[in-house]
């Protein structure tokens, strides 16, 4: 297998230098396959491998004249190789190089994304373990519902990123595909055996049935999976933004020394990282739509997809990788305020324990409609008063005290009742 040309940063994978290097990898892999099968001299391949090179500026200079990127690249490579260069690109079409090399770029990018996704999994797992018993209020429709723990919320995030990681592993098989099948994909001027050998050398699988290009459903799948990964990050970011609101303040982004929140209001500590993640997710999501538009090409190929992919693939890969790094930093350094969580949960005198009171009354023989009416009346009275106290109202309601002892009422207001099965969820996730 040819040694893969790898660079440490995502942005480097989408430079002209890296792109041309992958083109050269593909051309050399095909030459090696041709030589292995006895179609071209082995000595010529040795000379090609020893001399083949390119100069980015020279390629771009030639392209400005010939208006064809692959021809410009091959012209420049042959300036280095000399006579043996006639064996380069034999029986191939431009898309053999472009699509197979693009697969190498996508795989390299995906490997970096998977690595960052794994780091995110670790950070969320650790934070979920840390706040396993940090009690807070759960919300539905943005309204207080019933007690949960912050760790339980994070466990839900963990389950989601684990699903995304599994999708990315599956995706790698989908995109690690090359094609060396010539014009319109019929192998008229190159053997399928050459494709199989060349793809093996590159760490790819031959496409099952290509046209002149690899069908763009694979690329659309790639972009859709990135959109899903970043949509998850957006969900986490939106949650943090809501929990950081001044009137909630249960968590907060880390605010470094010397950081400023507003040019006009010195008191501001804004959730800028979460807002950044929210905004960038919109770009990746819109790029996935553009990738879907690329699927329907004319006949065996056109190049309407090419100009789109020059934007959406590097942008989406770079953005996804950056967003994962931002999310890792955000969650790792997140400030959590258990005291505020407890205070918010107990506002209106524990009105969020209404269902426990309802069920306790039903258990004592009161029909559901009557029990619901009793509990709702007390809950709404507490809710509608600035210093309303549901617990006190329940303790003073004869209809309740006739059925429930003081101890039974207190049991209804114990948040631990809501947490008794959380261990099962943690066990499923291996936390």
Image (tube, grey):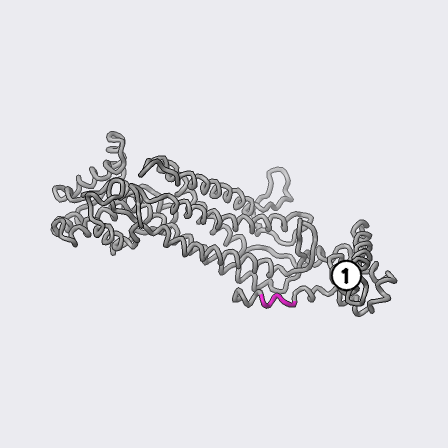
Check disc 1 and report the residue beneath it: 358
Whole-percent x, y for residue 265 in the image? 64, 40
Residue for point 67% across, 50% down: 248
Q: Nearer the viewer, residue 5 or 381?
A: 381
126 left or right of 65? right
Quarter holding residue 420: bottom right
Quarter holding residue 185: top left
Q: Nearer the viewer, residue 281 or 173?
A: 173
Whole-percent x, y for residue 138 in the image? 66, 56
The region drawn magenta spans 420-424
Q: Is residue 29 visible?
A: no
Q: Is residue 322 visible?
A: yes
Q: Main secondary structure of the magenta part?
A: helix
Residue for point 63% across, 67% down: 421
Residue for point 20% across, 41% down: 77
57 left or right of 322? left
Count of number-bearing discs: 1
281 left or right of 84? right
């Amino acid at each position: 297998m040819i040694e893969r040309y790898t660079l440490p940063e995502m942005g480097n994978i989408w430079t002209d230098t890296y792109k041309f290097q992958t083109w050269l990898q593909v051309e050399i892999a095909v030459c090696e396959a041709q030589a292995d099968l006895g179609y071209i001299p082995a000595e010529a391949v040795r000379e090609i491998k020893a001399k083949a090179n390119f100069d980015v500026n020279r390629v771009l200079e030639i392209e400005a004249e010939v208006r064809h990127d692959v021809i410009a690249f091959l012209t420049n490579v042959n300036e280095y190789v000399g006579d043996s260069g006639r064996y380069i690109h034999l029986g191939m079409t431009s898309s053999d190089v472009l699509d197979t090399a693009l697969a190498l770029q996508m795989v390299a990018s995906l490997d970096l994304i998977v690595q960052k996704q794994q780091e995110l999994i670790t950070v969320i797992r650790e934070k979920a373990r840390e706040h396993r018993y940090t009690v807070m209020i759960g919300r539905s429709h943005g309204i207080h519902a019933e007690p949960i723990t912050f760790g339980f919320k994070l466990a839900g995030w963990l389950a989601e990123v684990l699903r995304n990681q599994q999708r990315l592993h599956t995706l790698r098989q989908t995109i690690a595909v090359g094609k060396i099948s010539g014009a319109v994909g019929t192998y008229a001027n190159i053997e399928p055996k050459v494709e199989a050998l060349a793809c093996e050398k590159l760490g790819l699988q031959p496409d099952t049935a290509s046209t002149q290009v690899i069908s763009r459903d694979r690329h659309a799948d790639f972009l859709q999976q990135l959109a899903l990964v970043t949509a998850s990050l957006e969900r986490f970011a939106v949650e943090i933004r809501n929990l950081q609101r001044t009137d909630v303040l249960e968590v907060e982004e880390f605010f470094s020394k010397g950081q400023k929140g507003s040019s006009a209001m010195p008191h501001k500590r804004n959730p800028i990282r979460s807002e950044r993640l929210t905004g960038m997710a919109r770009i990746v999501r819109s790029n996935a739509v553009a990738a879907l538009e690329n699927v329907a090409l004319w006949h065996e190929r056109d190049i309407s997809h090419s100009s789109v992919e020059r934007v959406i693939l590097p942008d989406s890969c770079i953005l996804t990788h950056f967003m994962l790094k931002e999310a890792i930093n955000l969650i790792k350094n997140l400030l959590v305020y258990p005291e505020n969580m407890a205070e918010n949960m107990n506002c209106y005198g524990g009105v969020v324990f209404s269902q426990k009171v309802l069920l306790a009354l039903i258990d004592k023989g009161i029909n559901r409609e009557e029990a619901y009416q009793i509990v709702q009346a007390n809950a709404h009275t507490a809710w509608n008063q600035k210093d309303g106290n549901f617990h006190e109202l329940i303790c003073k309601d004869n209809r309740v005290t006739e059925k429930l002892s003081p101890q039974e009422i207190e049991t209804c207001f114990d948040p631990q009742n809501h947490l008794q099965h959380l261990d099962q969820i943690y066990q499923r996730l291996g936390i």
